[in-house]
Image: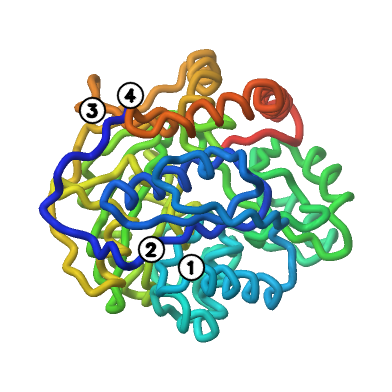
Amino acid sequence: MAKRTGSVPFEADRAVPGLIVKFGAYPLHHGGVGAIRSLGRLGVPMYAITEDRYTPAAASRYLERAFVWPTTGTEEPERLVEGLLRIGRRIGRPTVLIPTDEEAAVLIAEHQDALTDRFLLPRVDPQLPRHLASKQRLHELCVEHGIPSPTAAFPQSYDDIVDFAEKARFPIVAKNREAFVRRSRPAVNGTTKISTREGLLALARDWGEHPGVILQEYLPREEAEDWIVHAYFDQDSTPLALFTGVKVRSWPPHAGMTANAYVVDNPELADLAARFIKQIGFTGIIDLDLRFDRRDGQYKLLDFNPRMGAQFRLFENESGVDVVRAMHLDLTGRPVPEGEQRAGHRYIVENIDLPAFLAYRRSGYTTPHAPAKASGTELAWLAGDDLRPFFTMLARFVRPGAKHLYQLWRTNRRGSSTSSGSQQ
C-alpha cells in the first residue's frame, strides 16, 4: 500500500492552490489523483475538473472542491478558456494549473496571455506543446536536433501509401499523426501494428482522401526496452527535477498506459532528454516515452507528452520532490530542493497490472533492467491516508472496466496476424 510521504525539507506555499485540468471523459485517471495527494499532503488546497461528483479524484480527502464540467476535448477553445476563467474566479486567488492531457496542455499554452491574470503556469512558446504532441512535428524536431527516433513516413494520399507499401519492410506501425484523436473518426485506434502490405492497403482504404497517419518503423520488442523520463524544466529550460525509469508492463501490452515500472538510474538517457529540452526551449513538466533499440544501441523517442504523466508518482527524489511539487515550488518562487532519485522504487497501477502481467507472461517478454527486488512500492490507487479514491475506482471499474480490458486484449490478439494490435 502506498504510504503517506513523511516530513520533507521544504515548505510549499499553502496560499496558492492547484487545479487539475482535464478535458474529455476519462474518470479513472490515477495521475490526477496522484497530483491531488502529492500537493494536498503538503497542505496545498487542491481543486479539480471532474466529469461528475463520483470520480476517484472527487472522492479524495485532499480535494477542496470538484468542479463538475463534462467535456469531450473537442469544444471550441474560446469556450474552454472561458470555463477555466470562470473556475478561476470561483477559486478567488492565483492558482497553479496542472494539465493531465494534451488538449489541456496545448490550450493553456496557446491562451496563456488570457489565463495569467487568474493562474500560474510555465511561460512557453505558445505553439511548442502542440508541435511536441504532434507525431509528425515531433519527428521533424528530432531530425532537426539529432535526437534518434524511428524512421517514419507521412503519406498525403492513398497513392503515397501504395508507393510506401512497395518499399516498406514489414511489420510497420501506424499512429494518428496529431495528438487530438478525440475527433469523430480517428484513422487508427491508438498504436497499430501492421504485418503485411495487403493489411496496410486494406486499412488505408478507410483513411480518406488525406490520411492523418504516420507510418513508422517497427521496433521489435525482442530487441528493445521501454524507458520513460519525467522532468520539470524552469524558465531557462534547466531541469529542476529529472527522473528516469524502465517500463516493465503496459496495457494494452507493449503500447498503452504504464501498468508497472521501476526507477532506474540512466545518466545517458537523462542527458539526452535535458539536451533536447534545452535545444527546443521547453518550460514545464514533460513525460517522455523512449525505446532502446539493442540493434543499434540508440534510445529512440516515441512520444513527447508536454504535461504531467499519469505515472509521475513513480518518481520522487530524496528531498521528497516529484515533478508536480517541483512545478508548484518554482511557480510560487520557492527553491526546488535537489536530491537523488529513489532508485529501485516500483509503481503499480492495480486495475491494469494484473491483465498486463498475464499478457506479458504469455509472451515471455522480460525487462533486463528491472531490479530483482523493489526498494519500495507506490500504488496508483490505494493509499492508507486516502482510501476513498481506491474504492470509488473499484465501483466504477469492475463491470465496464473488465469489459474494456477484454476488448483491448482481443484487439491485441488479432493484431499479430493482419492489421491491428498495439505493439509499440
Of discs 3 and 1, which sits in the foreground?
1
Distance from disc 4 to disc 3, alpha carbons, whole Å, reads 10 Å
Secondary structure at badge 3 equals: strand
Q: Position of residue 417 (x, y in %)?
A: 73, 26
Looking at the picture, tell me which residue is in the foreground, 41 or 249: 41
Looking at the picture, tell me which residue is in the foreground, 320 or 67: 67
Q: Residues within 10 Å of mark 3 (few under 14, many from 20)?
A: some
Asked whether the beta carbons under mark 3 and mark 1 sit within 8 Å of each other, the answer is no
Q: Which of marks 1 and 4 precedes in the sequence?
A: 4
The residue that mark 3 highlights is 376
Tell me the amino acid under the disc marked 3.
Gly
Mark sitting on residue 1: 4
Q: Position of residue 300 (x, y in %)?
A: 42, 52
- Can the viewer see residue 350? yes
Distance from disc 1 to disc 2, alpha carbons, whole Å, reads 9 Å
The residue that mark 1 highlights is 91
Of discs 4 and 1, which sits in the foreground?
1
Mark sitting on residue 17: 2
Q: Which of marks 2 and 1 precedes in the sequence?
A: 2
Tell me the amino acid under the disc marked 4.
Met
Residue in the image at 34% along x and 75% along y? 279
